[in-house]
Protein backbone atom coordinates (compact mmCIF):
# COMPACT_ATOMS: atom_id res chain seq x y z
CA UNK A 1 0.00 0.00 0.00
CA UNK A 2 1.15 3.57 -0.63
CA UNK A 3 1.67 4.51 3.04
CA UNK A 4 3.42 1.35 4.16
CA UNK A 5 5.95 1.69 1.35
CA UNK A 6 7.37 4.71 3.18
CA UNK A 7 8.17 2.70 6.29
CA UNK A 8 10.94 0.16 6.70
CA UNK A 9 9.11 -2.71 8.35
CA UNK A 10 10.95 -4.97 10.72
CA UNK A 11 11.36 -8.48 9.25
CA UNK A 12 9.32 -10.36 11.81
CA UNK A 13 6.35 -8.01 11.48
CA UNK A 14 6.46 -7.34 7.75
CA UNK A 15 4.42 -10.39 6.82
CA UNK A 16 1.78 -9.64 9.42
CA UNK A 17 1.40 -5.98 8.49
CA UNK A 18 1.31 -6.57 4.75
CA UNK A 19 -1.11 -9.45 5.07
CA UNK A 20 -3.42 -7.29 7.17
CA UNK A 21 -3.30 -4.41 4.73
CA UNK A 22 -3.79 -6.81 1.83
CA UNK A 23 -6.97 -8.03 3.46
CA UNK A 24 -8.18 -4.46 3.83
CA UNK A 25 -7.49 -3.81 0.15
CA UNK A 26 -9.84 -6.66 -0.73
CA UNK A 27 -12.54 -5.17 1.46
CA UNK A 28 -11.96 -1.77 -0.13
CA UNK A 29 -12.71 -3.22 -3.54
CA UNK A 30 -15.81 -4.90 -2.18
CA UNK A 31 -16.97 -1.62 -0.68
CA UNK A 32 -16.51 0.21 -3.98
CA UNK A 33 -18.55 -2.41 -5.82
CA UNK A 34 -21.34 -1.88 -3.31
CA UNK A 35 -21.25 1.92 -3.92
CA UNK A 36 -19.68 2.28 -0.45
CA UNK A 37 -22.84 3.74 1.09
CA UNK A 38 -23.44 3.48 4.84
CA UNK A 39 -25.87 0.73 5.75
CA UNK A 40 -28.74 2.21 7.80
CA UNK A 41 -28.99 -1.10 9.65
CA UNK A 42 -25.42 -0.57 10.88
CA UNK A 43 -25.92 3.01 12.05
CA UNK A 44 -24.28 3.94 15.34
CA UNK A 45 -26.52 4.68 18.30
CA UNK A 46 -24.49 7.06 20.43
CA UNK A 47 -25.02 8.23 23.98
CA UNK A 48 -26.14 11.90 23.86
CA UNK A 49 -25.42 12.25 27.58
CA UNK A 50 -21.75 11.32 27.34
CA UNK A 51 -20.13 14.75 27.75
CA UNK A 52 -16.63 13.26 27.40
CA UNK A 53 -17.33 12.30 23.77
CA UNK A 54 -16.18 15.12 21.48
CA UNK A 55 -18.45 14.53 18.50
CA UNK A 56 -17.03 15.10 15.05
CA UNK A 57 -19.95 14.73 12.65
CA UNK A 58 -17.70 14.66 9.58
CA UNK A 59 -15.59 11.82 10.96
CA UNK A 60 -18.66 9.95 12.16
CA UNK A 61 -20.02 9.99 8.61
CA UNK A 62 -16.67 8.97 7.13
CA UNK A 63 -16.24 6.13 9.62
CA UNK A 64 -19.77 4.78 9.24
CA UNK A 65 -19.96 1.06 8.60
CA UNK A 66 -21.01 -0.06 5.13
CA UNK A 67 -20.67 -3.78 5.77
CA UNK A 68 -20.02 -6.37 8.42
CA UNK A 69 -18.19 -9.62 7.87
CA UNK A 70 -17.57 -12.27 10.53
CA UNK A 71 -18.32 -9.77 13.29
CA UNK A 72 -15.95 -7.10 11.95
CA UNK A 73 -17.27 -3.82 10.58
CA UNK A 74 -15.79 -1.92 7.61
CA UNK A 75 -16.12 1.65 6.40
CA UNK A 76 -16.36 2.87 2.82
CA UNK A 77 -12.56 2.81 2.43
CA UNK A 78 -12.47 -0.84 3.42
CA UNK A 79 -10.80 -0.13 6.77
CA UNK A 80 -11.99 -1.66 10.06
CA UNK A 81 -14.41 0.57 11.94
CA UNK A 82 -16.50 0.59 15.12
CA UNK A 83 -20.16 -0.21 15.69
CA UNK A 84 -21.98 1.16 18.72
CA UNK A 85 -25.57 0.37 19.70
CA UNK A 86 -28.01 0.53 22.61
CA UNK A 87 -27.64 4.28 23.18
CA UNK A 88 -23.86 3.98 23.41
CA UNK A 89 -23.92 1.13 25.90
CA UNK A 90 -22.90 -1.70 23.58
CA UNK A 91 -19.87 -1.88 21.29
CA UNK A 92 -18.61 -4.38 18.75
CA UNK A 93 -16.06 -6.93 19.95
CA UNK A 94 -13.06 -5.27 18.30
CA UNK A 95 -13.74 -1.87 19.89
CA UNK A 96 -14.05 -3.53 23.30
CA UNK A 97 -10.87 -5.53 22.75
CA UNK A 98 -9.10 -2.40 21.51
CA UNK A 99 -9.98 -0.57 24.73
CA UNK A 100 -8.48 -3.39 26.77
CA UNK A 101 -5.36 -3.71 24.62
CA UNK A 102 -4.79 0.03 24.55
CA UNK A 103 -4.87 0.27 28.34
CA UNK A 104 -2.58 -2.73 28.65
CA UNK A 105 0.06 -1.64 26.14
CA UNK A 106 -0.30 2.03 25.15
CA UNK A 107 -1.76 4.21 27.88
CA UNK A 108 1.47 4.55 29.89
CA UNK A 109 2.85 6.81 27.15
CA UNK A 110 -0.23 8.05 25.31
CA UNK A 111 -2.42 8.56 28.36
CA UNK A 112 -5.70 6.96 29.44
CA UNK A 113 -8.39 6.93 26.75
CA UNK A 114 -5.94 8.18 24.12
CA UNK A 115 -5.76 11.63 25.74
CA UNK A 116 -1.99 12.03 25.41
CA UNK A 117 0.76 12.94 27.87
CA UNK A 118 3.67 15.33 28.23
CA UNK A 119 5.85 13.09 26.06
CA UNK A 120 3.46 11.35 23.67
CA UNK A 121 0.63 12.71 21.49
CA UNK A 122 -3.06 12.23 22.06
CA UNK A 123 -3.97 9.36 19.76
CA UNK A 124 -7.61 10.38 19.82
CA UNK A 125 -6.41 13.42 17.86
CA UNK A 126 -3.86 11.59 15.69
CA UNK A 127 -6.53 9.20 14.42
CA UNK A 128 -8.52 12.10 13.04
CA UNK A 129 -6.08 12.18 10.11
CA UNK A 130 -4.06 8.95 10.15
CA UNK A 131 -5.19 6.33 7.66
CA UNK A 132 -5.27 2.65 8.54
CA UNK A 133 -2.10 2.03 6.53
CA UNK A 134 -0.25 4.89 8.22
CA UNK A 135 -1.36 3.67 11.64
CA UNK A 136 -0.12 0.14 10.99
CA UNK A 137 3.15 1.42 9.55
CA UNK A 138 3.91 3.62 12.57
CA UNK A 139 2.98 1.00 15.16
CA UNK A 140 5.02 -1.69 13.45
CA UNK A 141 8.03 0.35 12.39
CA UNK A 142 8.09 3.18 14.92
CA UNK A 143 8.52 6.89 14.31
CA UNK A 144 10.95 9.61 15.25
CA UNK A 145 10.19 13.32 15.54
CA UNK A 146 13.48 14.86 16.62
CA UNK A 147 14.47 18.48 16.08
CA UNK A 148 15.79 21.43 18.06
CA UNK A 149 12.56 21.84 20.02
CA UNK A 150 11.18 18.31 20.31
CA UNK A 151 12.54 14.83 20.79
CA UNK A 152 9.76 12.30 20.44
CA UNK A 153 10.51 8.70 19.59
CA UNK A 154 7.79 6.11 19.04
CA UNK A 155 9.39 2.67 19.45
CA UNK A 156 8.64 -0.07 16.95
CA UNK A 157 6.21 -2.69 18.22
CA UNK A 158 6.61 -5.07 15.29
CA UNK A 159 7.97 -7.82 17.52
CA UNK A 160 5.32 -7.41 20.23
CA UNK A 161 2.50 -9.83 19.50
CA UNK A 162 0.39 -8.29 22.26
CA UNK A 163 0.22 -5.28 19.94
CA UNK A 164 0.51 -6.59 16.38
CA UNK A 165 -2.00 -9.40 16.90
CA UNK A 166 -4.57 -6.80 17.93
CA UNK A 167 -3.79 -4.06 15.43
CA UNK A 168 -7.36 -3.76 14.14
CA UNK A 169 -8.73 -3.75 17.69
CA UNK A 170 -6.50 -0.83 18.68
CA UNK A 171 -7.32 1.02 15.48
CA UNK A 172 -11.11 0.83 15.79
CA UNK A 173 -11.06 1.81 19.46
CA UNK A 174 -8.93 4.88 18.76
CA UNK A 175 -11.04 5.62 15.69
CA UNK A 176 -14.14 5.64 17.90
CA UNK A 177 -12.40 8.01 20.31
CA UNK A 178 -11.26 10.30 17.47
CA UNK A 179 -14.77 10.72 16.05
CA UNK A 180 -16.35 11.13 19.47
CA UNK A 181 -18.43 7.99 19.08
CA UNK A 182 -16.97 6.80 22.39
CA UNK A 183 -16.07 9.02 25.31
CA UNK A 184 -13.76 8.50 28.26
CA UNK A 185 -15.64 5.45 29.42
CA UNK A 186 -14.99 1.77 29.77
CA UNK A 187 -17.21 0.01 27.21
CA UNK A 188 -20.05 -1.72 29.00
CA UNK A 189 -21.91 -4.34 27.03
CA UNK A 190 -20.24 -5.87 23.98
CA UNK A 191 -21.02 -8.10 21.05
CA UNK A 192 -19.92 -11.71 21.34
CA UNK A 193 -16.37 -12.50 20.32
CA UNK A 194 -16.52 -13.64 16.68
CA UNK A 195 -15.16 -17.06 15.83
CA UNK A 196 -12.98 -15.38 13.20
CA UNK A 197 -11.36 -13.30 15.97
CA UNK A 198 -10.71 -16.41 18.05
CA UNK A 199 -9.08 -18.15 15.11
CA UNK A 200 -6.95 -15.16 14.10
CA UNK A 201 -5.83 -14.63 17.70
CA UNK A 202 -4.82 -18.26 18.10
CA UNK A 203 -2.89 -18.31 14.82
CA UNK A 204 -1.13 -15.00 15.53
CA UNK A 205 -0.13 -15.82 19.09
CA UNK A 206 0.90 -19.33 18.11
CA UNK A 207 -1.42 -20.95 20.60
Image (cartoon, rainbow, N blue to C red):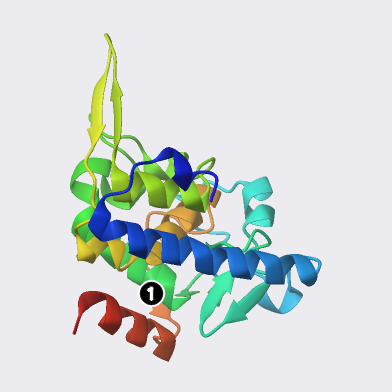
Residue 153 at x, y percent in the picture: 23, 32
The answer to whether residue 159 is above or below residue 29 is above
The answer to whether residue 152 is above or below residue 50 is above
* 74 sits to left or right of 192: right
Q: Say which of 105 and 207 sits in front.
A: 207
The answer to whether residue 57 is above or below residue 36 is above
* Residue placed under numbered mark 1 in the picture: 188
Q: Locate the C terminus and report the quarter of the image it occupies.
A: bottom left
Residue 169 at x, y percent in the picture: 39, 66
Residue 137 at x, y percent in the picture: 39, 47
The answer to which image quadrant residue 126 occupies is top left
Q: Secondary structure at mark 1?
A: loop
Residue in view at x 55 percent, y 50 percent: 179
Residue in view at x 40 percent, y 52 percent: 136
Residue 122 at x, y percent in the picture: 36, 39
Q: Residues within 10 Å of mark 1 (few under 14, many from 20)?
A: few
Amino acid sequence: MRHLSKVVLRPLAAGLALATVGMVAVHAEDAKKADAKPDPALANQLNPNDKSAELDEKLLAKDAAVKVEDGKYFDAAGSPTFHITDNGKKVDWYTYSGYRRYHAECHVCHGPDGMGSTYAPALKDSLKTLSYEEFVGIVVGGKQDVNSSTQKVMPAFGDNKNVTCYMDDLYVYLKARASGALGRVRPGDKEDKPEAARKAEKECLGG
